[in-house]
Image (cartoon, rainbow, N blue to C red):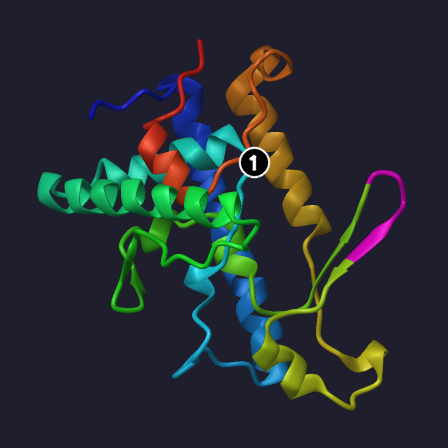
């Protein structure tokens, strides 16, 4: 499948997104270290979580990673993605929370690790975010994180404040999409759906 991405401005935005992703990963690693959190031998793989993603720039960057893969590997991931979407629809039709392995997961390793999305990098530790209306949201973290900090005073529990990181992502989204952001459909898709849909079309 051919790339369908902005070339001039997109290249600079992607470089900055890659840098932002690196900083997200570093912030996550530090928070996990402080909490003694490790994913080793975890029995509840977060790659089966039902995550939805919301930016065209991340969707495009994911496909940038896909297009760097050999055709055979790309075809395998797309086949898995189609099957995952079918399973999502089946679970949702029964009012069940989907629990389906990410199509990019190869025996616990991400097939496009460098291009994995924001939520994939930050899920697990406690996260906080200050909304524009002043509300602060708190995401408690995975079961291992919660177990590790059990009994600690709340103010001593390590937390990753993703407010500024998220603001940067929003800024990159605005630069990448431009004025069309106001008229394009809102992105609200799982990673598997982003693969099935192909690269986003921004005209």
> Where is the N terminus found, in terms of image quarters?
top left
175 relative to 190, above or below: above
Q: Residue furthest bottom?
A: 151
Q: Residue furthest top?
A: 203
| The magenta segment | 132-137
Q: Secondary structure at mark 1?
A: loop
Task: Specify the quadrant of the image occupied by residue 140.
Answer: bottom right
Q: Does residue 52 appear left or right of residue 11 in this picture?
A: right
Q: How many marks?
A: 1
- Give me the residue at 52% from left, 49% from top: 94
Task: Specify the quadrant of the image occupied by residue 160.
Answer: bottom right
Q: Which residue is mark 1?
A: 54
Q: Does residue 31 appear left or right of residue 72 in this picture?
A: right
142 relative to 202, above or below: below
- Give me the residue at 24% from left, 40% from top: 78
**Can you see residue 23?**
no
Q: Residue furthest right?
A: 134
**Can you see residue 107?**
yes
172 or 71, which is in the foreground?
71
Q: Residue 79: within the magenta?
A: no
Q: Main secondary structure of the magenta part?
A: loop
114 or 46, which is in the foreground?
46
Mark 1 closeness class: few <14, some 14–19, many ≥20 residues within 10 Å: some
109 or 99, which is in the foreground?
99
Q: Position of residue 41 (x, y in %)?
A: 39, 83
> Where is the C terminus found, in terms of image quarters?
top left
Q: Residue 134: within the magenta?
A: yes
Q: Position of residue 197 (x, y in %)?
A: 35, 28
63 or 21, which is in the foreground?
63
């Amino acid at each position: 499948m051919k790339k369908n991405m902005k070339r001039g401005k997109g290249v600079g935005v992607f470089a900055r997104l890659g840098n932002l992703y690196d900083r997200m990963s570093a912030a996550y690693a530090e928070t996990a270290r402080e909490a003694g959190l490790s994913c080793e031998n975890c029995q509840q793989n977060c790659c089966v979580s039902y995550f939805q993603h919301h930016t065209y720039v991340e969707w495009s960057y994911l496909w940038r990673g896909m297009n760097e893969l050999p055709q055979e590997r790309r075809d395998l991931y797309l086949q898995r993605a189609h099957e995952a979407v079918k399973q999502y629809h089946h679970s949702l039709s029964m009012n069940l929370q989907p629990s389906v392995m990410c199509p990019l997961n190869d025996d616990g390793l991400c097939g496009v690790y460098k291009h994995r999305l924001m939520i994939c990098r930050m899920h697990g530790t406690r996260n906080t975010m200050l909304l524009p209306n002043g509300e602060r949201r708190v995401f408690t973290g995975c079961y291992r994180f919660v177990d590790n900090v059990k009994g600690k005073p709340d103010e001593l529990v390590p937390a990753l404040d993703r407010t500024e990181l998220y603001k940067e992502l929003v800024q990159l989204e605005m630069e990448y999409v431009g004025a069309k952001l106001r008229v394009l459909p809102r992105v609200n898709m799982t990673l598997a759906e982003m693969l099935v849909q192909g690269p986003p079309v921004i005209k």
